[in-house]
Amino acid sequence: MASKDPAKNAIYNAAYHATHREEIAARKAASRTANIEKARAQEGSRRATNREKLQAQDKARYAANPEKYRAQRRARHAANPEQRNAKARARRLANPAQHKAYGVTWYWTHREEASMANAVWRATHQDEIRAYRVAHPERGQVAWQRRRAHKANAPVNDFTPAQWREMQAAYDHRCVYCGKRRKGTLTQDHITALSQGGSHTYRNIVPACGSCNSRKHAGPVLVPVQPLLVL
């Protein structure tokens, strides 16, 4: 029977919870399982009305036991990899700008860690990397050209592997200068060279064989060309 004294009730409740912790936890788990939708709705409502407070509590718990929570996340991912990967993809697609900003921020705040992890991964996956490069040579060229454009501080640097494939197909895999068909070996020639302030974008790129690209170098085009306006 409950006492009329709040202090005594508090002491009694604390003692009861201490001595029946497992029993209480089991009852709560059974109730949540039996009313899962209701429990989720209640949890969502509680977090929505106390978002900042709960986020602060979560951060404090994580800061106090980072390894524990990392291990829990890894265990959950290992138990349901497809489900968690699908959720992650959905979040990235729904918030691409936010995801990109988070990735950039994380990289610059964990640069040494990221570089070390990347080096370890590359060292242990040499055969896979080599096979991928052989199967997708155009991706390597696109990545190299984007690095060149980044180093040259190109005004625009948005040329993608998909655009490069479409451009080669539109030109029938021929060099725009000599007209020879060079499927699989064409190079990206910048109409206005990167060293002259040109952009790395489809409006400033045409496919050229290695010989013509070398002859043109950073000078004017070898013959009049019309870049693709729409891809």
Image (cartoon, rainbow, N blue to C red):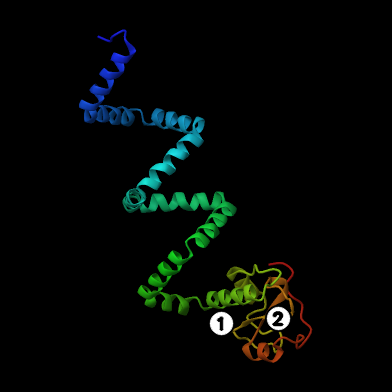
Depth check: give the residue in front, 226 or 65: 65
Mark identifier at residue 184: 1
Q: Quadrant of residue 26?
A: top left
179 w.r.t. 148: above or below: below
From the viewer's perspective, is 133 left or right of 75? right
Q: Measured from the top left, where is residue 157 in percent x and y?
A: 66, 69
Q: Quadrant of residue 100?
A: bottom right
Instruction: Find the residue positioned furthest to the left.
Output: 19
Q: Is residue 42 above or below residue 148?
A: above
Nearer to us of marks 1 and 2 is: 2
Q: Position of residue 65 (x, y in %)?
A: 35, 47
The 10 Å Cα crowd at callout 2, few under 14, some 14 to 19, many 20 or more, is: some
Q: Residues within 10 Å of mark 1 (few under 14, many from 20)?
A: few
Report helix, strand or loop for mark 1.
loop
| Quarter occupied by residue 215 | bottom right
Cα separation between marks 1 and 2: 26 Å
What percent of the width, then of the height, locates residue 20? Answer: 21, 26
Does dot 2 land on a helix, a strand or a loop? helix
Numbered label tally: 2
Question: Mark 1 vs mark 2: which is more N-terminal?
Answer: 1
169 vs 152, nearest the viewer? 152
Residue ID for mark 2: 195
Say if residue 20 shows up in the picture: no
From where the camera sits, is residue 37 visible? yes
Position of residue 90 relative to residue 54, above or below, is: below
Viewer-proximal residue, 180 or 35?
A: 35
Quadrant containing the N terminus is top left
